[in-house]
Image (tube, rainbow, N blue to C red):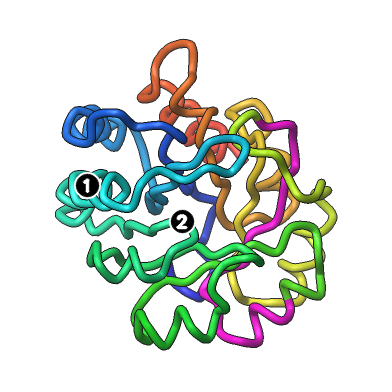
């Protein structure tokens, strides 16, 4: 992921909210990556009501997954916690509005780190993040999601507005599936962030990745 928008919309994969066995998940995750293009993996281990997994478990899952992503040069990001991203040797962090400020995360992780910022449905928050130097801004939620309780509801119009005025990539998040990702891509999203749409896919997560990529490539 770079500050220049990709030529086409790509899949930004988020872990399921609960991973019980770090090594077992990483082994299964490798076959998921074989199914299609994945721009990055965000390790997000948090219940729908916001309860995060213990730090040592987050680090264990990150380490196991990094063993899979690093050889493929797929960035691994940690959700919320720049300090854990640093400890994990991750390529970056995704921070929300209630997490460490962008400047603090950048100072801790360095100029080469990928730092994305949640902006909900706010044009103002996105402009502030982009001006500060964020590598991407994330808008959502666009559709109902069981992964978390959304703080805001976004419409595709904000993706179009952003893509027409700014070069910093945008990530569309919230209830994204193979059936609806095309709408977000058409609106101007550079990445679609998906969790349940892959991990709870009725035909398995590999099929979820394959079908989302097929939908994005058909645009």
| x 40%, y 52%: residue | 39
| x 49%, y 26%: residue | 211
Q: Is residue 135 magenta?
A: yes
Q: Report if the CB atoms under discs 1 and 2 are less than 8 Å apart.
A: no
Crowding near pointer 1: few (<14 within 10 Å), some, many (20+)? some
| x 65%, y 51%: residue | 172
For the question of whether residue 2 can be seen, the reply is: yes
Q: Is residue 203 above or below residue 41?
A: above
Dot 1 falls on a residue whose secondary structure is: helix
Residue in front for this viewpoint, 149 or 132? 149
> Residue 11: x and y, percent?
48, 45
| Residue that numbered label 1 is attached to | 60
Q: Which residues are magenta?
A: 127-145
| Count of numbered labels shown in the rendering | 2
| Residue that numbered label 2 is attached to | 79
Residue in front for this viewpoint, 120 or 31? 120
Chain-order first, disc 1 or disc 2: 1
Q: Is residue 210 above or below residue 53?
A: above
């Amino acid at each position: 992921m770079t500050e220049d928008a990709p030529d086409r919309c790509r899949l930004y994969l988020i872990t399921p909210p609960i991973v019980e066995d770090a090594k077992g998940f990483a082994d299964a995750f490798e076959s998921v990556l074989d199914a299609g293009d994945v721009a990055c993996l965000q390790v997000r281990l948090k219940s729908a009501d916001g309860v995060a997994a213990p730090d040592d478990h987050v680090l264990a899952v990150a380490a196991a997954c990094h063993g899979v992503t690093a050889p493929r040069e797929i960035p691994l990001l940690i959700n919320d916690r720049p300090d854990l991203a640093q400890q994990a040797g991750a390529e970056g962090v995704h921070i929300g509005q209630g997490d460490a400020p962008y400047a603090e995360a950048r100072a801790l992780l360095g100029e080469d780190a990928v730092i994305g910022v949640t902006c909900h449905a706010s044009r103002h928050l996105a402009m502030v993040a982009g001006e500060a130097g964020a590598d991407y801004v994330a808008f959502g939620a666009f559709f109902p999601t069981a992964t978390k309780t959304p703080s805001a509801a976004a419409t595709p119009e904000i993706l179009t507005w952003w893509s027409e005025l700014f070069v910093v990539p945008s990530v569309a998040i919230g209830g994204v599936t193979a059936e609806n990702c095309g709408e977000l891509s058409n609106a101007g999203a550079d990445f679609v962030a998906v969790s349940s749409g892959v991990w709870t896919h009725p035909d398995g997560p590999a099929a979820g990745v394959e079908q989302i990529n097929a939908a994005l490539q058909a645009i």
